[in-house]
Every structure is written in C-alpha cells, then in structure tokens.
Image (cartoon, helix red, strand yellow):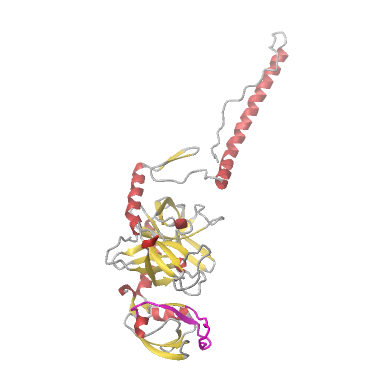
Amino acid sequence: MDDTLSMDPSPPPVPDLLPPPRPQRSGCALVAIAVISGAIAGLAGCLVALAYFMPQIQNRVGSQGAPALAPLRPGKTVTAQTDLTIEGGDSEAIKRAIAKVMPAVVHVTQAIPRDVPIRTPQGGRDVGAGSGFIIDGKKGFVVTNAHVLANPGLPTEPELYVKLAGQDDSQRILARRLAVDPYHDLAVLKIDTGGKELPQLQFGDSEKLALGDWVIALGSPFGLAETATVGIVSAKHRRLAIADKTYDDLLQTDAAINMGNSGGPLVNLNGDVVGVNSVIQSPTGTSAGVGFAIASSRARTYIEDMMSRGYLGVVMGPYEQKPGTAAAPDGHMCEVRDVLPKGPADAAGIKVGDVILRIDSTDIAGMEEVVNLVGSKKPGTVLEIVVFRPSEDRQVRLKATVGDRTEY
C-alpha cells in the first residue's frame, strides 16, 4: 500500500469556452476576468483544504497500513514530508552500543516438563517466552521480569531455559529461579556457565537521562532473538497500574517494545542498562510507540535487595490435594513444588509435595509468609520447619540453614 500522497501544483488545462474578446464589448472582457479570477480563487481554496487535511490523511494511512514514518534505523534516512536523519556520530554510537550489549542479552523460555504428559496444540513443550540479560557472567545470574516466569496454568511449575546470543534452540541452557519479586516484577535466574565467564551488563544511572536522549531496547519480540530497536526517552517517573500490579517509577520510550521484549534491557549509548523493558500501552497489543521500562535506579535497588535476602531454595505454589494422598491440615496452603538441588531446603530434607505448616513459632497459611519470614533472616540462621508430607500422611520436623543466594 502506497502511503505517499503527491499533488501537482499546476491546475489542469481548462477549455477556452469564451470567444475572443472584442474591444467594443468591454463587458465580455470583464466577464472573462471574473471567470479566471473565480478559477484562481477556487484553486487556492483546494490547496488550502489539501494542506489542512494532508496530515490527517497521512495519519490515517499510517494507522491502517504501513506507518506514515518508517521506524528509525541507525544510519538510515527516513523520508516523508521532510527528511529525518540520525546524525553520523549518533549512528556510530548506536552501532557500538548494540555490538557491546547484544552478547549479554538472552532469550528466556518456559517449557512443559518432560515428565508431564501434555503438549501444546502444536505438539511442542514451549508455553511462554521473554527476554533477559546477564548481570554476573561468572555466576550466571540473569535478570528478567517476574511475569515472564508466571505459570501459564500447568499442573506443575514449567521448566525454564535460557538461550544465549548466537545459540540455537538445541543449545539452550536449563535455568532455575534464584529470586523472584512479583510486586516489583523482577526476577533473577541462575544458569550454568560451563566454567566460562559470560558477557555481562552494568547498570547505569537512569536519573541522568534527559527527555530526548537516545535509548535502545534489546530482546526477543515475537520470539525474534537478538533484536534491537531505537528511540528516545519520552518521559520519566511514570506511574502505571495494570491489573493487580502498580509500577512506581517507569521510563517511557518510543523505541518499539513488543510481546517477548519483557525482561530485556533498555540501554543508553554507552551500553549501560537504564531500564528493564516491562510493559506497553497499545490498543492492539503491539507497539504503538508507548513503551515502559523499570528505571535502573529502582531496578538495581530491588535486585540487590532480592539477592541479599535469606534463601531457602524452594519453588512454592498453592496446595492442591493429589489423588491417593492424605489431606493437609486446614488453613495451610503453601505447597513445595520444586527443591533446588544442594540448596538449604534440599540439605534439610524438604521434598516436593510437602506442605509447610510452621517456621519456628509462626504458622504458615500461604506462600507470602514464607517469603517474608525467610527473607528477613540473615544467611546462616537456623530455622525449625514443620511440614506435612501427604504421601506419608505425617508431619515432619526439620532444621534448615538459611542460605546466601549469591553462593548458588
């Protein structure tokens, strides 16, 4: 569809319907002058009308077909009514930043566990995807959004995989949840680096950004890994409420952010992370030039807080009685869905399927109580944990030593 509107400024030829004027009939000359004047005035009116409606026509074309202005691309000229060009210096800076950052950007996938006998309608195992970035290349720590890890309705927790830049699906690495903060929509994963030091990114200071500064969003929109889009900082300190979640400090950008970009980095021209891409506002569900990233000044604080909190090494979910097992005591709904190998819970003897009844003297009704209580303890603290084991229809008293997340 062609969205370019052109207009020939010269009027079309008009047939001469009047006989040649005669000197003795000056009235005819006046009539001819009046007709020509009227034609000129009419043409001028058409030009004014076109000038007024042209932007509206272009905007409508842009919303229904190809955009009226093509996306900005480093080093390319965008042409519409005027020529817009990213200056050569900025273009080179954008290229350098992308080359620096992309090796540390990853693709995050959720998959149905191999031992669960269900598959997607397409016959596969993948049920969700997003983006992320490495913050510690030695330990294999990866930042993403908490909502990227949300269970899509499986009877058990999905497996998580991370695909590094330059890898194909056959090379993706099994990952585990190290820390999840659903309130602030951030999470840290842990992957096995294979003894290598992977590329990593550093957080920059989002407070130093100014409106109009260039930023780059990187990630895997629609599953297209290693994608970069360019835009500017449109606004700062946005507050946004979506469903049951409130984002307190967001950067707004017109860099294209789409499904699959969640958890990827928003970087400045130095390649420093200034935001974590998280959400968009759009009537269609795809980028409308209004995207939001959790500002790095907040994200870094939240992540440091997560990583410093006490650690038990379990994945929890709401308790559901399984066929052939005894029912847990009423009022206790925190079931252990997964246990991190060699973590504190594993060392204490906690098993998948256990229902946590009490930690020290605190009765446990739900998952949040476990997160808050264990998180408030310093690494090395010994906890007495009482669980109900439905498969054995008995309560088990265990001792667990609170772990340090950075050691796993």
Question: Is residue 145 shown to the viewer in this render?
Answer: no
Please provide percent x and percent y for residue 403: 33, 79
Please provide percent x and percent y for residue 12: 61, 24
Quadrant holding the C terminus: bottom left
Q: Could you tell me which residue is drawn at 39 percent across and 45 percent down?
A: 74
Q: Nearer the viewer, residue 73 or 397?
A: 397
Q: Is residue 170 above or below residue 385?
A: above
Residue 105 as seen in the image, left or right of residue 355: left
Q: Could you tell me which residue is drawn at 37 percent across and 82 percent down?
A: 345
Question: Is residue 403 shown to the viewer in this render?
Answer: yes
Please provide percent x and percent y for residue 335: 47, 81
Q: Could you tell me which residue is drawn at 72 percent across and 14 percent down?
A: 27
Quadrant holding the N terminus: top right
Please provide percent x and percent y for residue 37: 65, 23
Of helix, strand and loop, which mostly describes the magenta segment? loop
Please say whether residue 339 is one of the residues in the magenta stretch. yes
Q: Quadrant of residue 34?
A: top right
Q: Is residue 95 above or below residue 314?
A: above
Residue 361 as seen in the image, left or right of residue 281: left
Q: Nearer the viewer, residue 37 or 147?
A: 147
Please say whether residue 5 is one of the residues in the magenta stretch. no
Q: Is residue 408 above or below residue 69?
A: below
> Total number of numbered labels?
0
Magenta stretch in the rendered image:
317-343
Q: Nearer the viewer, residue 330 or 208?
A: 330
